[in-house]
Amino acid sequence: MDFKKQKPIYQQIADTLCERIVGGQWKGDDRIPSVRDVAIQLGVNPNTVMRSFDHLQQAEIIYNRRGVGYFVAPDAKERILQLQRKEFLDEELPAFVQRLSVLGMTLDDLKQYV
Amino acid sequence: MIDIKNFSFSYTKTQVFDNINLQFQKGAIYGLLGENGVGKTTLLKAISGLLKPTAGSCTVDEQVSFDRQPEFLQNIFLLPDEVQLPDSATPEKFFNDLAPFYPKQSGEMLQHLAGELKVDISRKFKEMSFGQQKKSLLACAMALNTDYLLLDEPTNGLDIPSKADFRRILSEKVGEEQTIIISTHQVKDVENLIDPIIIISNNSVLLDASVEKITDKLYFEYGGQQRPDALYSEMMPGGYLNVLVNNGMGESQLNIEGLFNAVLRNSAMIKNLFE
């Protein structure tokens, strides 16, 4: 079955912000742009961006200093990588393994390519 | 808050609304969607006090719209789809003529918005293209800075870069005290901007829900096959969009055209699902 799941916008925005942390653009305790600034940059509803920030705050990737703004958690990069590893093992890898079996290939067949 | 209660409206022969209820809260950009001629403009006119309900009421911050009290009028602005403009007028003059009636207006904001939308507000309207006129009027409407801003088909006539500029300035504009209502049939132009979404048709409200609630109740699948149980399916490059009832499938990316078609085709079922 060809099944592609497309994430809701607020998660896509959260993923984009995470990329900037993993890529090293934003480091621990750096202040990140406000909800409003992100909304204006992307031309999306500020409430949607607020949901992305809530989501990241719950995952302890960013933290809020009341009246000042949002900051990158000191261990944010490691937290994101942990989440992404889990997502890879739970979702991407099973799909990949299934694709291999459809194509009549095994993991051993791939060794020569990587 | 805008409160529409048991609201009915008829023109001499045609009934447009039959006993509808709607509320619009502060701090949100509402999308009012519907096919041509279903009454989007009528509703905006009733909210802004230009039409009297045949039955029921329409109030804004507890003031009856049609009473048209000064405190009500100075805090609401409706930008119609088409505006009769005097040939010699410039957007600057248009704004300055209106400004004394709107206490929160800001000339500085007008300059900023005109810059963002790349329009010259000292030029005469008659020397402008339709799209430039529209953008100038949008800048004026937003700079009047009312708590309630009603925009009827604001993206009509805008070119593609201007549509993106429009989305940016609106997300910049909406504050906690503001209520913005955008009525449109060009649903794609306001995707990701509007939340909540209201869909009207056949004298009634078919859907009135936040994006979060919509993606909780409906699942938008971008897949390889057309699903027999889909509320709506559409062929897309690379496969099908299926709009399904969300039975614990998680959250997906809302597709506004898919939503619109699914709601129009399954109105009774959608009403039950969202109750």
Image (cartoon, rainbow, N blue to C red):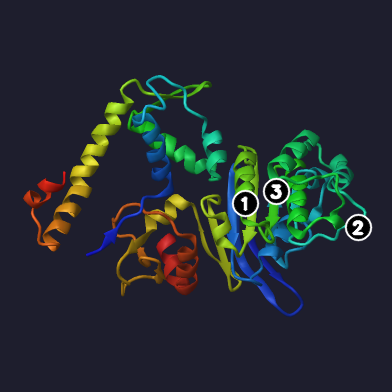
Instruction: Evaluate whether label 1 is on the same chain as label 2.
Output: yes
Q: Amino acid at mark 1?
A: Pro
Provide residue B200's location: percent of width, then percent of height: 58, 66
A58 left or right of B203?
A: left
- Give A48 or B121, whichever is nearer the viewer: B121
Distance, label 3 to label 1, CA atoms, is 23 Å
Specify which label sits upstream in the sequence, 3 or 1. Answer: 3
Task: State the residue lying farthest toward the front.
Answer: A112
Callout 3: residue from which chain?
B
Disc 1: which residue: B161
Q: Are marks 3 and 2 in contact (CB under 8 Å)?
A: no
Please, what secondary structure does the residue beneath circle 2 have?
A: loop
Tell me the residue at 33%/26% (across/down): A76
Q: For mark 3, what is the residue? A: B149
In the drawing, does residue B254 fall left or right of residue B177?
Answer: left
Residue drawn at the location 80% of the way across and 53% of the way down: B67
B169 over B249 or under it: above or below: above
First reached walking from the N terminus: tag 1 or tag 2: 2
Residue B87, numbered circle: 2
Q: Are marks 3 and 2 on the same chain?
A: yes
Residue A105, given in percent of the width and then of the height, sits at 10, 57
